[in-house]
Image: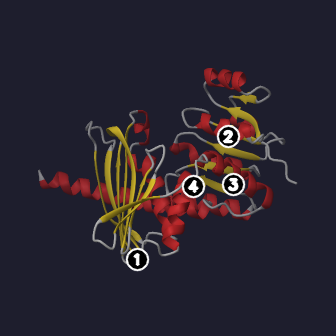
């Protein structure tokens, strides 16, 4: 049996959730962060777990055979590349990289070195998302005609990403692809707005085209005080609505009954934490050599769509400016 000793890189607002789950799984070996206050908190919460401020020490540590990266997205490529070259299995939070060529390189490097590369596309491990996927695959909704994902919140800290789609849209793209079992063919259109006039795009709309003439729309925003996490899947028989802001009854099916009235069906759901399932899956893949559900190829495909959307967004914004010149 392969022993799994994981180093967590970055233990901030999201990394602390990874630390909790990895510790509970008894695979957390060391936490690396630049903030001494965070490291002291780790010492207090997780006795016996080592802490470090040096990434180079982590990747050269023979006791560490896997690295989980939960740092700002612009650092993902460089940190993941160093870890893979050092022979470590890697889990990296979404997005895998900030360019599809970088994502492709990481995927190739993991393949050549026979290492696990997994991307933190959390919703692929969400029990309710998996329930919806099964309903679609079993034909419960009929032919899929349209998807709409609305993901909005109020998050000033995330503006360091320069574009809201790199923070939020990986969830939407990976989830839509997963439940359909299809990869988007291309971006039909994309537009975005900087509400502070500082070139940082806070609000975005993306239209995707999936095989089988299935259109999909994504709305992302950092400026909405009322959080919205809503996926609607319209089918020829039924429409599914997944509302992830709810604590229960997250998934409902809407359809016209025999009397011509709108009927709402609530489905039983698992309450298992998606991040726990995701962390367990990473450990499983390290031990067995199985390909992760959200592997490097999956990560690359999402980054490719994001980059295409961002390019179209810039073109759209230039045209908008020229229109008023």
User: Residue 34, relative to residue 178: is it above or below?
Assistant: above
**Residue at 67% in and 40% down:** 21
Residue, far front: 259
User: Which label sits in the foreground, 1 or 2?
Assistant: 1
Can the viewer see residue 39 in this picture?
Answer: yes
User: Which label sits in the foreground, 4 or 3?
Assistant: 4
| Residue placed under numbered mark 2 in the picture | 21
Mark 2 surroundings within 10 Å by alpha-carbon count, few (fewer than 14), some (14 through 19), many (20 or more) = some
Query: In which quadrant is the N terminus drawn?
Result: bottom right
Question: Marks 3 and 2, how far apart in space?
Answer: 12 Å
| Residue placed under numbered mark 1 in the picture | 143
| Residue placed under numbered mark 3 in the picture | 281
Quarter occupied by residue 119: bottom right
Left/right placement of residue 134 relative to residue 238 reads right
Which is more N-terminal, label 2 or label 3? 2
User: Residue 54, relative to residue 298: is it above or below?
Assistant: above
Mark 1 surroundings within 10 Å by alpha-carbon count, few (fewer than 14), some (14 through 19), many (20 or more) = some
User: Residue 174, relative to residue 275: is it above or below?
Assistant: below
**Residue at 73% in and 37% down:** 23
Question: Marks 4 and 2, how far apart in space?
Answer: 17 Å
The percent coordinates of residue 297 (x first, y second) are: 59, 64
The percent coordinates of residue 266 (x first, y second) are: 45, 57
Which is more N-terminal, label 1 or label 4? 4
Q: In front: 68, or 292?
A: 292
Question: Marks 4 and 3, how far apart in space?
Answer: 13 Å
Query: What is the secondary structure assignment of the residue under circle 4?
Result: helix
């Amino acid at each position: 049996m392969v022993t799994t000793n994981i180093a967590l890189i970055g233990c901030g607002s999201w990394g602390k959730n990874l630390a909790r789950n990895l510790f509970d799984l008894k695979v957390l070996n060391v936490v690396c962060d630049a903030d001494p206050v965070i490291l002291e908190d780790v010492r207090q919460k997780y006795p016996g777990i080592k802490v470090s401020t040096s990434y180079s020490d982590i990747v050269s540590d023979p006791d560490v055979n896997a690295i989980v990266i939960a740092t700002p997205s612009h650092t993902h490529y460089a940190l993941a590349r160093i870890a893979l070259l050092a022979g470590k299995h890697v889990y990296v939070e979404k997005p895998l990289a900030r360019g599809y060529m970088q994502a492709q390189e990481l995927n190739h490097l993991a393949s050549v070195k026979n290492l696990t590369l997994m991307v933190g596309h959390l919703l692929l491990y969400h029990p309710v998302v998996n329930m919806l996927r099964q309903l679609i695959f079993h034909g419960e909704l009929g032919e899929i005609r349209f998807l709409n994902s609305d993901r909005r919140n109020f998050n000033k800290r995330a503006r360091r990403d320069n574009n809201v789609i790199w923070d939020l849209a990986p969830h939407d793209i990976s989830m839509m692809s997963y439940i359909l079992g299809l990869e988007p063919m291309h971006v039909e259109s994309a537009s975005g707005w900087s509400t502070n006039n500082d070139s940082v795009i806070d609000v975005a709309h993306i239209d995707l085209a999936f095989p089988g003439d299935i259109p999909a729309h994504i709305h992302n925003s950092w400026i909405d005080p009322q959080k919205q996490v809503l996926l609607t899947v319209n089918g020829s028989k039924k429409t599914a609505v997944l509302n992830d802001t709810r604590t229960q009854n997250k998934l409902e099916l809407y359809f016209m009954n025999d009397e011509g009235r709108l009927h709402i069906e609530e489905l039983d759901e698992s309450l298992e934490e998606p991040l726990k399932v995701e962390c367990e899956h990473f450990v499983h893949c390290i031990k067995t050599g199985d390909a992760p559900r959200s592997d490097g190829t999956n990560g690359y495909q999402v980054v490719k769509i994001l980059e295409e959307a961002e390019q179209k967004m810039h073109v759209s914004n230039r045209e908008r400016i020229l229109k008023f010149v």
